[in-house]
Amino acid sequence: MSLSGRLFLTVALTAVAIYPVRAQDTHAYALISSDEKDVFFVDLKSVTKNSDIDSFWVLDVTDPTASKFSYQMFQYAISCTNWRLVTLYSASYGVDGTALNSGDPHDTTGAPIIPGSIGEATANYLCKGIDPHPDVITLPDTNSAVRAGHDVIAETKKYLATSKSDKPLPPKRTTTPVKHDGAI
């Protein structure tokens, strides 16, 4: 298990043990990517399939010391055949959980999925079943995921600050990019 995977697993288990799940807040947040600024989860319970198009929500937990947002939610549609991603809706929340803003994006035409991006990691997970972190648990509610995300950001920053070398965390797993053509 990678250092980032072990770190996430430790703080995630702590978050689940400490913070109770609210009955109305049931999700299955799976880790997609993390660094010292953001931790991205896809909510597996939000995935809806309609032919080739999948709709799903992503939770982006942000560094609360570097942003006015504590976390953001994005709803996307993805075409597994045409390898395109469209943002359908977004909402941002403050440190106290208060909704700060929300709305539909101005451009709903979508864009090709960029190789090596968080979008590609999510597309590989949803379209091809390639879990970028198979050794990491899913989190059952938003509070646990946000707290775990903040803990991972803090621990990553601490690790990078105290590291005796200039090397960052081990690289994230990558997959071979696949060329896709067409539009949603």
Image: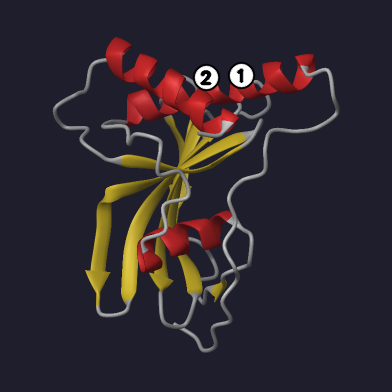
Q: 58 left or right of 62? A: left
Image location (x, y in percent) of residue 118: 56, 54
Q: 12 above or below 18?
A: below
Q: Which mark is residue 154?
A: 1
Q: 9 left or right of 7? A: left
The residue sitting at 25% across, 39% down in the picture is 27
Q: 173 above or below 129?
A: above
The residue sitting at 40% across, 35% down in the picture is 136
Q: Mark 1 and 2 residues: CB-CB less than 8 Å, in contact? A: yes
Q: Which mark is residue 114?
A: none
Can you name the residue that lies furthest to the left here?
Answer: 23
The residue sitting at 51% across, 57% down in the picture is 121
Q: 53 left or right of 89? A: left
Name the kind of residue labelled 1 in the image.
Ala
Q: 164 left or right of 177? A: right
Image location (x, y in percent) of residue 184: 44, 82
Q: Number of numbered discs present?
A: 2
**Depth order, front residue of 30/58:** 30
Can you name the residue that lies furthest to the top here?
Answer: 18
- Give residue 26's quadrant in the image: top left
**Depth order, front residue of 29/108:** 29
Residue on which disc 2 sits: 151
How would you rate the neighbour count of disc 2 (Cα within 10 Å): few for under 14, some for 14-19, many for 20 or more?
Answer: many
